């Protein structure tokens, strides 16, 4: 049976990583997902610096690893102890 006459459902993409703005979702102290990542500037198990669309984010902790990195979304796991965000932009 066809879907003729049924209402279409709008999909809200504001929380997805398709826009040119940055956002971060921290799940306890063990995982962070960052949207708007242009590139990884520095990566060690203690410190990760990310160049975002609208600034620089530094994640500090212990045993930090990259779980996924696709498009402009990066997911980091480990013991996260601090976040630092600046509005400087690196080319």
Image: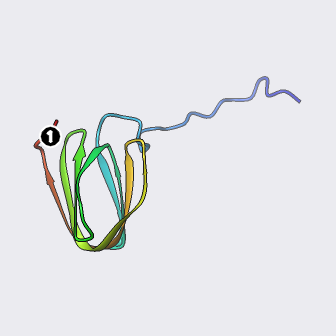
Residue under pointer 1: 90
Question: Based on the displayed image, in which of its 4 quarters is residue 2 positioned?
Answer: top right
Q: Residue at x 62, y 34 (%)?
A: 9
- Nearer to us in this view, 64 or 12: 64
The image position of residue 28, as x and y in percent, is 35, 72
The C terminus sits in image quarter: top left
Q: Is residue 74 left or right of residue 43?
A: right
Q: Residue at x 42, y 41 (%)?
A: 71
The image position of residue 17, as x and y in percent, is 41, 42
Question: Is disc 1 placed on a helix, strand or loop?
Answer: loop
Which residue is situated farthest in the right direction here?
1
Q: Residue at x 79, y 23 (%)?
A: 4
Position of 58 relative to 46 (above/below):
above
Please, which colouring scheme is shown? rainbow
Q: Is residue 28 left or right of residue 4?
A: left
Q: Is residue 6 left or right of residue 38?
A: right
């Amino acid at each position: 049976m066809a879907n003729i006459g049924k209402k279409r459902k709008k999909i809200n993409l504001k929380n997805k990583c398709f826009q040119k703005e940055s956002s971060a979702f921290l799940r306890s102290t063990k995982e962070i997902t960052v949207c708007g990542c242009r590139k990884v500037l520095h990566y060690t198990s203690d410190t990760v610096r990310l160049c975002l669309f609208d600034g620089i984010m530094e994640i500090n902790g212990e045993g930090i690893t990259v779980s996924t990195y696709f498009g402009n979304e990066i997911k980091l796991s480990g013991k996260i102890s601090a976040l630092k965000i600046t509005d400087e932009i690196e080319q």
